[in-house]
Amino acid sequence: MSVRLISRLDVKMSHLIKGVQMEGWRKVGSPTERAILYYQQGADEILYIDVVASLYERNNLHDVLKEVAEHIFIPITVGGGIADLAAAKSLMSIGADKLSINTAATKNPRLLRELSDVYGSQAIVLNLECKSLPSGGWTVMTDNGRSHTGRDAIKWAVEAVTHGVGEILVSSIDRDGVMMGMDLDLISAISREVEVPVIASGGCASSKHVKEAVEAGSDAIAVGAALHSGRLSLQQLRIDLNNQNFGLRPIPNVYNYD
């Protein structure tokens, strides 16, 4: 099995931002420049999430997506504020390869089937924002961790697959931005119950964290804070994993951006 390394970029308006546990956001750079940098470093995919899109009821990544799509040649997933087929079509027509859906799907699960029927299940990603419960298990959050749904994360993941989801992005709110390892119990619990690829997000900052997440059942790793802070580079991550004979996809063809 070849593991995908995905660069996650959370965006607010025109700024790349990062917080801790999806709070306390601060600006950390340009979402366009960083995506191109991570592409040049060997990312397998780019993941953009507009963190305030549901709040404003529209995705604001169109300009960023247009520019980035001209300069990078790996899959781009875009999420945030995609509430209907028209919003999806707008993003797919200007460079998105996959759509990440969260808030709208919890309100209208049929949306997942509508999108899957048009673009194929491989292009529909459920962004599963999970927060652990004191009593055990995980609850589903929306609006980038701001709103409670009352849904059980495991049950919702299973249901979403029946509606046509082709991948599940497991976003751990508790581990987000902490850079001390991923929620392995959560990853394992989701992976056991679904037969679609699982992308682990939240807490990755080393090759050790990647290996642990893959051993727990993830098929891909999304890295954000560790890249943005400079604590980790994709080149070094690839070197470390390859030195351990860990299966990675071949480095994509990279084109310099002037």
Image: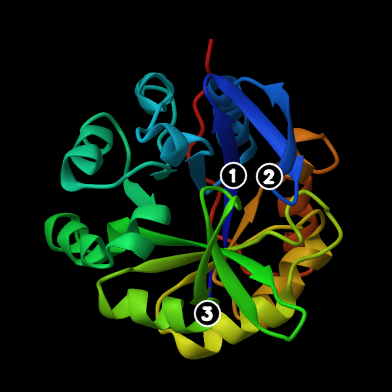
- In the picture of the structure, the residue carrying the numbered disc 2 is 224
Q: Point out the tag, 3 or 1, that comes first from the N-terminus.
A: 1
* Identity, as a three-letter code, of the amino acid under mark 2: Gly
Q: Are marks 2 and 1 in contact (CB under 8 Å)?
A: yes
Q: From mark 3 to mark 1, how far is it between C-alphas?
A: 24 Å
- Assess disc 3: are there few (<14), some (14-19) or many (≥20) residues with their C-alpha within 10 Å of its C-alpha: some
- Assess disc 2: are there few (<14), some (14-19) or many (≥20) residues with their C-alpha within 10 Å of its C-alpha: many
What residue is drawn where x is 75% and y is 66%? 182
Residue 45 horizontal/vertical position (percent)? 49, 47
What residue is drawn where x is 34% and y is 54%? 104
* Identity, as a three-letter code, of the amino acid under mark 1: Arg
Q: Secondary structure at mark 2?
A: loop
- Foreground: 155 or 189? 155
Res 38 visible: yes
- Foreground: 144 or 164? 144
Q: Is residue 171 above or below residue 226?
A: below
Nearer mark to the viewer, of 3 and 1? 3
Q: Secondary structure at mark 1?
A: strand
- In the picture of the structure, the residue carrying the numbered disc 3 is 152
Q: Secondary structure at mark 3?
A: strand
Horizontal arrangement in the rendering, residue 166 relative to residue 43 (left or right): left
Q: From mark 2 to mark 3, how far is it between C-alphas?
A: 25 Å
Residue 102 horizontal/vertical position (percent)? 42, 56
Residue 158 horizontal/vertical position (percent)? 40, 83
* Identity, as a three-letter code, of the amino acid under mark 3: Asp
State which quadrant residue 75 falls in: top left
- In the picture of the structure, the residue carrying the numbered disc 1 is 8
- Foreground: 200 or 235? 200
